[in-house]
Image: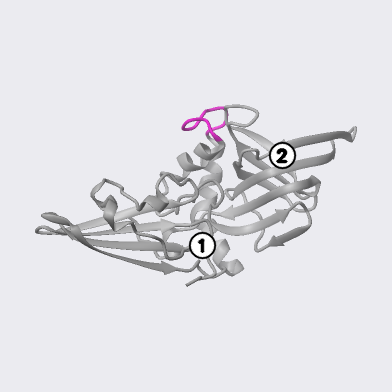
Amino acid sequence: METGYVANEVDLAGHTQWWLSPNGLPPVFQGRRDIYTESDESTSETLVTKEVFILFQDYSQTIITVRFDTQNPASAQLEQRHEGPPRSLRQDELEEAYERFGRSLASAVASRKDSVLGDGTPQALVHELLKPLKDALLPVGTRAYGALVYANLANASTQQNDEIRPGDIISIRNAKFQGKHGPMHAKYSVEVGKPDHVGIVSEWDGTKKKVRAWEQGRESKKVKQESFKLEDLRSGEVKIWRVMPRSWIGWTTD
């Protein structure tokens, strides 16, 4: 049955006994980079209950429960259920999430100027700074970073759910910016987000529609600031996300 969101019935491939591997996943999810997964396990004598949570980029999720006896793992019982994405947030709820994580993210990234975080990729910048925030929900792949604050598809359609704030996450895909900048109005053209690019907002100028953001691993391996003028977006997409708590999708803190 189609649900209207990404989470849907999948082949649990019981014959593969994937649940016996640490961090095991059904074959349909193995090696995928567009999902985020976690698992819990509880044991009572020889009976094991394992829950695997698969979070998709629309924030719908599939929860797989496996119950088996360690002395006879082939006779496992497998179940799957699916939950839709959380409802859209009101502006006051988005502001609350900002107070919880955004401010500290903004100051944390500013203190890492000229350093290299993780493996130096744009995504590592976000991951490394979110790690210390134990209640924060981690990104789903390279394309979903929380609740959507702003979306711009080649300036053909835009939506905005709250003011863009320092500490929000900016993601850029297949984008071309073209326009004029500087006191001499020099023409410029730049492509960003091939592959997917991400940074952390440091400043938003609503009148100039300009985002300043911290980034690494694009023009420079080190963390530095870059400006993106959203009015100059000619193709591709820019999205801005608010980092959310795990409770937003019903997850507890480990």
Between 99 and 54, the one nearer to me in the picture? 54
- Going from N to C along the chain, the mark reached first, 2 or 1, is 1
Q: Secondary structure at mark 1?
A: loop
Residue occupied by mark 2: 227
Please report the bounds of the magenta region as a residue range: 112-121
Q: Residue at x 57, y 62 (%)?
A: 95
- Asked if residue 253 is positioned above or below residue 208 in the image, the reply reads below
**Image position, residue 85 (x, y; %):** 50, 66
Q: Amino acid at mark 1?
A: Val
Q: Amino acid at mark 2?
A: Ser
In this view, the residue farthest toward the front is 15
Of helix, strand and loop, which mostly describes the magenta segment? loop
Q: Name the quadrant containing residue 67.
A: bottom left
Tell me if I can see residue 182 in this picture.
no
- Asked if residue 143 is positioned above or below residue 246 in the image, the reply reads above
**Image position, residue 185 (x, y; %):** 89, 35
- Distance, label 2 to label 1, CA atoms, is 33 Å
Labels 2 & 1 near each other (Cβ < 8 A): no
**Image position, residue 111 (x, y; %):** 53, 35
Please identify, in this view, whether the residue under mark 2 or under mark 1 is nearer the observer. Answer: 1
Left or right, 95 with respect to 229, comes to left
Residue occupied by mark 1: 6
Between 253 and 167, the one nearer to me in the picture? 253
Whether residue 18 is in magenta: the answer is no
